[in-house]
Image (cartoon, grey):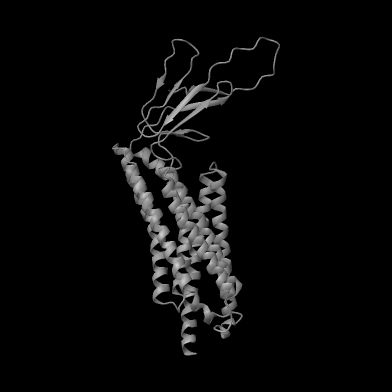
Amino acid sequence: MDDLVGILDLTVGTILVGLAVTGCLLGVTTAQTAWYFANYPHDRRLLKTLVVAVWILDATHLGLYGATMYIYLVDKRSQNFGAEPLPWTANVQLLCNACAIALIQSFYASRIWTLSKRKLLLGVMGTFIAVTWVFSVVLFIKTILTQSVAEYVILVPYDIGMSALAASTDVLLCGALVILLLTSRTGTQGADRLINKLMLYTVNTGVLTSVFGILALMMVALMPYSSLFVLFYYIGCRLYSVSLLSTLNARLGLRIEAERMGARSLPEIEITRVPTHKPSMQAPTPRRPDIVVSVHHLNATATSSSSTTADDSPTVATPQAVFCDDSRCYGVSDMEFSFGYDMTETVSCNDLDIRNAPEV
């Protein structure tokens, strides 16, 4: 009985610390989410859905966390701690964390696929992510079927397996991103400096989740009868969300930093839509050929041509990586695109009227 009281004291204290830390991290995630939607309103709908889903899972987890503490500390359920199973609010927390981690790891795997286009690497990462999620779901089902807290010792192998897989997946994703960025160097000073910053940022954001995953694995292996591993596991889950939103929100800062290093932008291009006129009885005007705008990343040349007259020659701009969104063109590629790939877009003259800005 004394051992059970000692375990209860350690468990309650650990859970209180974890509740405070995860609450603070949810505040950071909320601020990052607001910043994301304020500064990236034109991101893809799938990316916005990912951000909303991760925030909802984090908020749900914190609510269940607080409800569990209320049950044990206010309703006095802790008096029969060893003889009763965990409340459902504690069990569902595991499922929320598993879904959030799987979504965020899948996002990083998609970024790696964009950079590498290697099916084998994608298959390995997908296998690790899927097996980690399956282990988490199995552990969730096992906790529901367990009749008392005292019997939770039989779930230690599942805890070890889940923590080991999560830590291994973190190391794999972080290492793959760093290696791919290293191989993307072109020898150009400005581009290499930007890649170095990206590598440093990847390591800084990936190390935190990896460290807490390894700490959770060590705690569950060395102290299986305590809930210390839950503290590191829950904090690590919240750091996943912070890492994801930090990666998304850093794109604007990296673009500005790259331009500050000395990148020269292409001349501003004004794009206006030609108003649609009602059909008339006059003979149709011959259709002008399409304008082809080619954008080449990293040490490429952006050109535009039109065959309106025979004497017109292509206009060649300064070799520079270009990214265009709905409002303007920038002189540095966005993180959403990979290094070393070309993109070509055909714009119809009948739909758009493209001309240089007056100051060019």
Q: Position of residue 215 (x, y in %)?
A: 39, 68
Q: Position of residue 137 (x, y in %)?
A: 54, 65
Is 113 in front, or is 69? Answer: 113
Question: Which residue occupies 48% across, 23% down?
Answer: 292
Determine whether 175 is above or below 312 in the image.
below
Can residue 230 be seen here? The reply is no
Q: Position of residue 321 (x, y in %)?
A: 39, 33
**In the image as oriented, which residue stretches furthest toward the right?**
281
Please identify the quarter of the rendering in which residue 276 is found: top right
Figure label count: 0
Q: Is residue 85 left or right of residue 330?
A: right
Question: Which residue occupies 57% across, 79% down?
Answer: 72
Determine whether 205 is above or below 276 in the image.
below
In the rendered image, which quarter contains the C terminus? top left
Determine whether 58 is above or below 256 in the image.
below
Please identify the quarter of the rendering in which residue 188 is found: top left
Determine whether 136 is above or below 289 in the image.
below
Q: Is residue 279 left or right of residue 210?
A: right
Please identify the quarter of the rendering in which residue 208 is found: bottom left
